[in-house]
Image (tube, grey):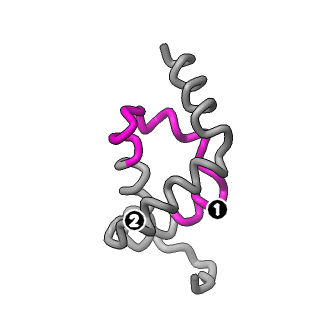
Amino acid sequence: MEKELKEALEEKFYCPVRFAEQIEKIVLVNSDMNYIDAIVYFCDQNNIDVELVTKLISKPLKEKIKCDAIHLNYLKKSSRAKLPI
């Protein structure tokens, strides 16, 4: 069953870039929603287990999620300087 879900995900989104575009659209439309919430919302709307989309999260999207997590105090702030976005 998990294999079928992975195949369905890959068919629908083709690659991490397309998944990231969908998440970006959700964040743009819902200005009060961060990237973490957007991924959870997307998974809820499409009846997808959140754990299955981990391979579709691109490096730039991971960085945005990390920034959200730091801002929400889910992660400790790093000592490295952060570029303004």
Tell me the residue that label 1 is attached to.
60
What residue type is disc 1 on?
Pro
Local crowd at mark 1 within 10 Å, few (<14), some, or many (≥20)? few
The magenta stretch spans residue 1: no
The residue where tag 2 is placed is 34
Residue 75 numbered mark, or none: none
**Residue 70: image x %, image y %?**
44, 69
The residue drawn where x is 52% and y is 53% is 22
Q: Of callouts 1 and 2, which one flags the residue occurring earlier in the amino acid sequence?
A: 2
Q: Is residue 62 magenta?
A: yes
The answer to which of 38 and 66 lies nearer the viewer is: 38
Residue 31 position, x and y percent, is 36, 72
Residue nearer the viewer, 22 or 61: 22
Instruction: State the residue at coordinates (48%, 61%).
Output: 25
Amino acid type for the residue under numbered disc 2 = Asn
Residue 44: image quadrant is top left
The image quadrant where one finds the C terminus is bottom right
Identify the residue at horizontal 56%, vertical 17% (top origin): 3
4 w.r.t. 75: above or below = above
Q: CA distance from mark 1 to mark 2?
A: 14 Å
Residue 67 screen position, x and y as percent? 50, 69
- The range drawn in magenta is 42-64
